[in-house]
Amino acid sequence: MNRTANVVRMQLINKKIFVWLPLTIFGAAFAISLIIYGAIYASVSDLTDPIYGGASQAPLWYFAVIGIQAMSLTFPFSQAMSVTRREFYLGTTLTALLASIGLAVLYVIGGLIEKATDGWGIDGYFFAVPWIWNQGPAAAGLLYFMAPMLTFTIGFFAATVYKRFGMLTLVLIGIGLAAAIALAILGISLGGGWPAVGRWFTGLTPVAVGGYGLVLVAALSGVSYATLRRAIP
């Protein structure tokens, strides 16, 4: 356990990867959104609908970059320090878990403030997106936790495949996924299944999406660990 904690400290030596860059992106996206919301609120006299934007996704997507860097920058150093692959994996995953929880807490607190202030007094919402908050703050927190964990895991998985098999294999996996999606779209179109697909998507709840996402996180994590065991530093 102590060696796993050492990996957490190792990942946080360069705090800008897990802490400062996500917070910078978070703060910049929030500030720019508020400026835009304020401009719309001040310039549109007959505004009746709340103002929403998609900038709140920016810090969540950045966790894919964190996953790549956590593997590619720190893994070689960890092996030189005689850290086992299992300890490196557990420590890195724990670091991502803590960072994702921290980000989710910020989003939930921000959403509660937005609801209490009617969108910062200008009816503009960065955190409290209606569908995400349909089942309350706990469900929103689950979704906001799942999203960075999923993007981190995807980035970590990609970096692990690159370390183990090289760029060609990584590109082939990407092509295979794109081909599978294209074939699925073709099959649904030929079978007239889009209405059913649409009903399934519209019937999803934040808790369901959060749960499905965490299942995918678990699956990708298992594959990543199996690949990491034979990865070359």
Image (spheres, grey):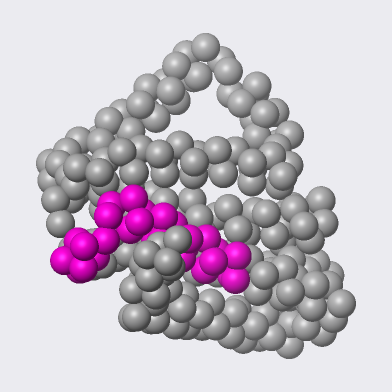
**x and y percentages locating residue 19 in the rendered image:** 46, 78
Q: Is residue 116 left or right of residue 219?
A: right
Q: Residue at x 33, y 81 (%)?
A: 14
Q: Is residue 54 left or right of residue 156?
A: right
Q: Residue at x 44, y 82 (%)?
A: 20
Q: Closest to the observer: 224 or 2?
A: 2
* Helix, strand or loop: magenta stretch: helix
The answer to which quarter of the image holds residue 182 is top left
The answer to which quarter of the image holds residue 221 is top left
Q: Is residue 131 left or right of residue 57?
A: right
Magenta residues, start to end:
77-103
Magenta stretch: includes residue 178? no
Magenta stretch: includes residue 80? yes
Residue 32 visible in rendering: no
Q: Closest to the observer: 170 or 12?
A: 12
Q: Is residue 219 above or below residue 136?
A: above
Q: Is residue 8 above or below residue 13?
A: above
Q: Is residue 139 above or below residue 230?
A: below
Q: Is residue 153 left or right of residue 158?
A: right
Residue 180 visible in rendering: yes
The quadrant in which the N terminus is found is bottom left
The quadrant in which the C terminus is found is bottom left
Q: Is residue 175 above or below residue 13?
A: above
Q: Closest to the observer: 104 or 74?
A: 74
Q: Residue at x 24, y 65 (%)?
A: 78
**x and y percentages locating residue 29 in the rendered image:** 53, 77
